[in-house]
Amino acid sequence: MEYRKLGKSGLKISEISFGAWGISGGWGQRDDDESVRALNRAVDMGVNFFDTAMVYGNGLSEELIRRALKGRNEQVYVATKVSPKNRIWSPPTGTINEVFPKEYIIECTEASLRRLGLECLALQQLHTWTDQWAEADEWQKAAEQLKKQGKILAFGISVDSHAPNSCLEVISTGLIDSVQVIYNIFDQSPEAELFPLAQELAVGIIVRCPLDEGGLTGKIRPETEFAEDDWRSNYFKGDRKEQTYQRVRAIEEWLVGDEVDSIVSGALRFCLSHEAVSTVIPGMRSVVHVEANCAVSEKGPLPAEMVSRLKQHAWDRNFYGKVP
């Protein structure tokens, strides 16, 4: 496993890290015991950064991380997120006092620490963002207090889906350590403005959805059926499975071969090929997922010519916000 700096935070984290939304449910059948095995296997393979949120399973994801890491001696870093108080994620609306008031951020952080069984979080993040709040005192004072109290090491934000430029002002304040953003072969938009600014100001980049909610695994085909409790039944509604399948096939036809052994490996290596990226956090609900994803780190970034060719496969669409 290779490690990278998380911006100016001082943390050195695994470039393949553990996205812990999936283990909390909503992705089909849930298996808590397998999730715990997957979390432990991740640590065995060098993963030292785990990204969760208070909303994932109403705290279940945090509790499973506590269960898995209890008694282990390895140095691991846990990041979580504060849900918007008004529970409006996308697009975020409301004043800072309606969404992220100071005392609410502190109370949520303390509750997450209890569920995780930790005294200090590596990273606390706000789970949605608009730059209308960039200069607001509420979140700034909360972050400052939590750091002074030793309850967090770093503070960051998770930006709205497919909206990488919604955080440029807050980055420029110098008061955040990281940004979590969607970045993958299909959505390459963060490269235009977000990544250069983050590099200039030493802000870490945490890449979520590197596999496009499963679209870039190659396993979602036109005939794929999702369980009723799998939220992807809506994300891939209508002809979206067919659209995704055809685009993935067009990539696989030339990408997979001697240099790249699978579309998953190629997709993760694409993300890691950009120097602004600190880590990618694919969802991993099983030991098999962990072993396959973690093995990608030793292969290194993609050759420059492959990265260049993948630029042609960017896809301007938003399956979260559009109604089929």
Image (tube, grey):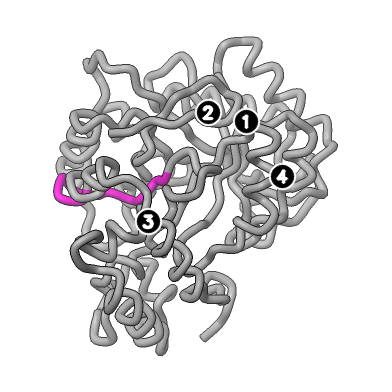
Q: Which residues are magenta?
A: 280-289
Question: Disc 3 marks which residue?
Answer: 303
Task: Tell me the residue that label 2 is attached to.
Answer: 123
Rendered location of residue 141, percent (x, y): 76, 23
Foreground mark, 4 or 2? 2
Along the line of sight, the residue nearer the viewer: 258 or 274: 258
Q: CA distance from mark 1 to mark 3?
A: 29 Å
Label 3, label 4: how many angstroms apart (C-alpha)? 43 Å
Residue 134: x, y in percent?
80, 41
Considering every residue shown, the one lying at the far top of the view is 149
Identify the mark nearer the N-term, 3 or 4: 4
Q: Give neighbour class at mark 3: few <14, some 14-19, many 20+ (Cα, 10 Å).
A: few
Q: Are marks 1 and 2 in contact (CB under 8 Å)?
A: yes
Q: How much space separates mark 1 and mark 2, taking CA atoms?
A: 9 Å
Quarter-of-image position of residue 82: top right
Q: State the residue position of label 1.
A: 177
